[in-house]
Image (spheres, grey):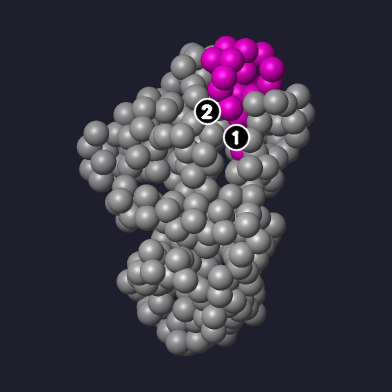
Amino acid sequence: MRHVDSLLRLSAQEVEEIFRISADLKTKWNQGARPRLLDGRVMTLLFEKPSLRTRISFESAIAHLGGSSIFLTCAEAGLNGREALPDVARVLGGYSDWIVMRTFSHRLVADFVKHGQCPIINGLSDQGHPCQALADLFTIREVYGNLKGRTLTFVGDGNNVARSLAAGAALLGMPFIISSPLGYELSQEFMAQLRTRVPTADMTMTPDPQAAVARADIVYTDVWASMGQEAEQEKRKTVFAPYQVNARLMSAAPKSARFMHCLPARRGMEVTDEVLDGPNSIVFDQAENRMHVAKGILIWSLGSDPVHSTSE
Ligand code: CP
Ligand code: NVA
């Protein structure tokens, strides 16, 4: 079963396969072609948190390819205690070709991987955001033509997005630098897991954002308080203030460095308008690529022959 619950589950070759399918379908899309590769397929989305990009990129992706989607909140699915979780997972898996999940706790995603009996796609949990990182790496490759050796610098919270970017960078041979305030770094447990999975990973952690961006090809940031951390908003505002990505910080990076953000952004907090709307920002390319890469993920996870499928 080809789950996309964590990037650490994938190999570099599998990521390349997803990219190849995504690029092929992006080209077709730009030519006005909408091959019905997923005719009759059903994707169920099971979300505990709000979403614009993840939900709509997957729903658009499957609609373009001829399939259907069903959106459910976790409460609607009966995960609020109405029914035992393994029962919900088995029943939904019986109706669905994929289940795309957005959850607070990654445990729920792991439980569905165990009981769901169809590919489970993590559309963001506290542990990671693999679909975002895949679209981001795909975008970086479009911009630079390659990934290996490109330095990805993340400035901010060692959160779900940072983890998946770190994992993706490690898999694809990209140096990854993360600059976080003390106490908000990537966890030691995650770092150990990453180093076990990819012993060659080139990872640097530093509390100094200026030093972190000095050799960046990409400067990436995300919100200081993720969904579910709203109560910490005020405290985090103070702690993270020196980590704002603004013109001053970007001037410490190479002139050619691109700016990335998974969005939604809190303008004026983790990033200023001048950077987000500036000439080096590629945030809306990232957002659009979520849809192209969603297609790659859906097709790849079915295990069908992508060359045959996408050339139909
Ligand atoms: N980047 C991202 O996942 O956005 P949404 O929260 O809107 O899905
Ligand atoms: N880290 C953010 C990402 C949103 C796409 C969150 O979890 O809220």
Q: Which mark is residue 218?
A: 2
Amino acid type, residue under disc 2 in the picture = Ile
> Which badge, 2 or 1, is on the more N-terminal residue?
2
Residue 269 shows in this picture: no
Residue at 46% across, 66% down: 310
- Residue nearest the observer in this picture, 174 or 285: 285
- Residue nearest the observer in this picture, 263 or 209: 263
Residue 245: within the magenta? Answer: yes
Residue 308 shows in this picture: yes
Look at the image and give the residue range highlighted in magenta: 239-261
- Residue nearest the observer in this picture, 206 or 201: 201
Q: Which element is circle 2 on?
A: strand
Q: Is residue 221 above or below residue 20?
A: above
Q: Is residue 274 above or below residue 38?
A: above
Kindly check if marks 2 and 1 are in contact, taking CB atoms under 8 A apart as contact.
yes
Residue at 47% across, 42% down: 137
Q: Which residue is mark 1?
A: 260
| Residue 30 image position (x, y, % from top left) | 63, 54
For the residue carrying disc 2, how many other residues have a C-alpha within 10 Å: few (<14), some (14-19), or many (20+)?
A: many
Q: CA distance from mark 2 to mark 1?
A: 7 Å
Question: In terms of image quadrants, where is residue 173?
Answer: top left
